[in-house]
Image (cartoon, rainbow, N blue to C red):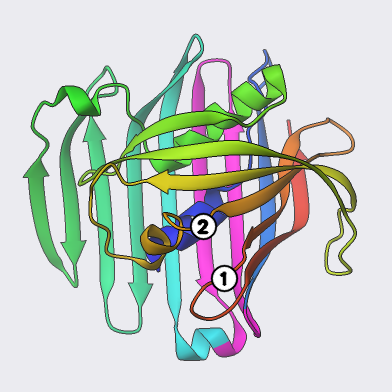
Amino acid sequence: MKKIYLFLSAAILFKTATVQAFSVSHDFNVQIGPFDASRTNFEYALTPTEYRVESVVKTNGLFDTLYPFRADYATTGRINGDELETLSYKYKSKSRFSSRSRELVYDKNGVPLYRLSSKNGKEKKVDILPDTKNKDTTDLQTVFAELARQYNKMKFCDSRMEVFDGKRRYDVIFKDEGKEHLAEEQLPYKGEAVKCSMYIDSLGSSGDDLLWDITQDEPIYFWIMEEENKKLPFIAKVEIESTPLGRLQVLTQNVTVKD
């Protein structure tokens, strides 16, 4: 389940960096089938030369009783012209029966060097062999920064992003799906939104989690709106039409902008 939460908590778009530094914090409710399943916070900060992304995901209510889970993600990097280069990526999670962590360590050029991971206290270091297939790849959170910079400049989603998670190479594919009017009662943000979809191309790699299986057969849909005061784009809603527990929806409840 951990990767599905990362996609959902990371699914907020970045504003193109300006001369001013700012941060944007978002609060989500995640609904899976009949469950009010999770509370998620996502925050990003940008300066003209650096960026930071942090996500916290925690299960909620009855879902927390059945499937207790918490995950924290953190990415830092630099902005080099039009490129966003990951410099560090850290992840840790805790469920009822296990605790895990992973850290990707990069060189000064943003190339992954090695992976530090642990499961239930057992630590392991794995060197990442030089591979041209990993050149110009990024981590999953930075993918959304790259998408947003494109969206701000050209107002479309269509793109293909290359990701390396320390074990596997895969591509994330975004497609434009037109416009729709959002008016759900649970959404504080209503109005016209741009609809996009997201798929995973596994490039022949095998997966070990729910999202990997689902998104090769059906997309994740998301709806982009703009924050009223500073016109920052954000995801108002995310949806997977079918999961083993029913339809999954992520609904943005609050967006806070800080200079």
Question: Image quadrant of residue 248?
Answer: bottom right
Judging depth in this view, the residue of 20 and 238 nearest the camera is: 238
Q: CA distance from mark 1 to mark 2?
A: 8 Å
Evaluate if marks 1 and 2 touch, with contact meaning CB atoms under 8 Å apart.
yes
| Quarter of the figure that contains the C terminus | top right
> Residue at image x 82%, y 39%?
227
Q: Position of residue 44 (x, y in %)?
A: 58, 39
Q: Residue placed farthest to the top in the image?
A: 81
Q: Position of residue 186 (x, y in %)?
A: 83, 69
The local crowd at label 1, few if under 14, some if 14 to 19, many if 20 or more residues have their Cα within 10 Å, is: some
Is residue 215 depicted above or below 161 in this figure?
A: below
Q: Is-magenta flag for residue 122?
A: no
> In the structure shown, which secondary structural element does the residue marked by tag 2 occupy?
loop
Q: Position of residue 238 (x, y in %)?
A: 66, 56
Q: Tell me the magenta residue range.
A: 33-62
Give the residue pinned by disc 1: 242
> Residue at image x 83%, y 31%?
231
Q: Position of residue 201 (x, y in %)?
A: 37, 44
Three-letter residue code for mark 2: Glu
Q: Main secondary structure of the magenta part?
A: strand
- First along the sequence among labels 1 and 2: 2
Three-letter residue code for mark 1: Ser
Give the residue pinned by disc 2: 218
Locate residue 41 relative to residue 50 in the image: left or right. Answer: right
